[in-house]
Image: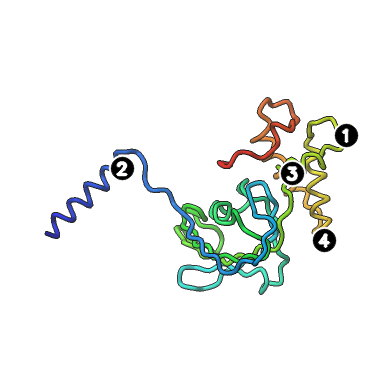
């Protein structure tokens, strides 16, 4: 009986491989706390402010933004500024919400690892979302960024917007980060490669990014 079951399992695995697709990695999401009233939920393109703790599978903490007296972190959701597991696991979240994310290696640091993170590590994160802001890809932000009202954005206008947003919340300007964020936006959205972003090009629509 055991051999029959084993044979069926192997056949099923081979059929999956022949089909050309293996099951995609997924993030395990657990909502630990959610506010009673939620005025806005996070979506791709929003800028999020979070505190977070990181743990290995054995429960050992490898990072805590609060314990290490670091400021909460701003990032733009959905453009790979953070782990892909975070981009997937922090969607549709309310300010004040806390989540537990269990992120498989394929959506974390993969086969290479990084720093103190060994290769092929499944990581657990406790994430608290403190604030949601219009990100650099929303229509409202496009209007704010269009300094000369010509209905297109230059890289200078995008970087100026990012600098002002960081300064508004007490963070020092980070020219390298702003340059990288602007470059990423232009690489993905400047479809006609004219060095400017129209409102149509810029507005964040592409979930796959």
- Quarter of the image holding residue 5? bottom left
Q: Which residue is mark 1?
A: 148
Q: Position of residue 28 (x, y in %)?
A: 48, 60
Q: Residue furthest left?
A: 1
- The local secondary structure at tag 2 comes to helix
Q: Position of residue 44 (x, y in %)?
A: 63, 47
- Is the C-beta separation of discs 4 and 1 under 8 Å? no
Q: Residue tagged by mark 2?
A: 17
Q: Are the residues tagged 4 and 3 within 8 Å (C-beta)?
A: no
Closer to the observer: label 1 or label 3? 1
Tell me the quadrant of the picture where the N terminus can be found.
Answer: bottom left
- Crowd band around label 4 with a 10 angstrom C-alpha radius: few (<14), some (14–19), many (20+): few
Q: Quick one: quadrant of the C terminus?
A: top right
Q: Residues within 10 Å of mark 2 (few under 14, many from 20)?
A: few
Q: Secondary structure at mark 4?
A: loop
Query: Can you tell which mark lies on residue 170?
Result: 4
């Amino acid at each position: 009986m055991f051999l029959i079951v084993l044979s069926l399992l192997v056949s099923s695995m081979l059929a999956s491989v022949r089909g050309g697709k293996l099951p995609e990695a997924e993030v395990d999401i657990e909502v630990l706390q959610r506010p009673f009233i939620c005025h806005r939920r996070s979506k791709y393109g929003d800028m999020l402010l979070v505190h977070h703790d990181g743990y290995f599978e054995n429960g050992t903490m490898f990072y805590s933004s609060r314990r290490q007296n670091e400021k909460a972190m701003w990032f733009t959701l959905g453009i790979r500024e953070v782990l892909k597991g975070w981009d997937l696991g922090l969607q549709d979240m309310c300010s004040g919400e806390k989540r537990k994310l269990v992120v498989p290696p394929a959506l974390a640091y993969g086969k290479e690892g990084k720093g103190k993170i060994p290769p092929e590590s499944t990581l657990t994160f406790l994430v608290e979302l403190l604030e949601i802001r219009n990100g650099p890809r929303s229509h409202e932000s496009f209007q704010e960024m269009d300094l000369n009202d010509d209905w297109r954005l230059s890289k200078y206008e995008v970087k100026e917007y990012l600098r002002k947003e960081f300064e508004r919340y007490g963070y020092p300007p980070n020219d390298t980060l702003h340059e990288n964020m602007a470059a990423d936006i232009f690489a993905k959205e400047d479809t006609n490669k004219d060095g400017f972003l129209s409102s149509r090009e810029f507005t964040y629509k592409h979930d796959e990014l």
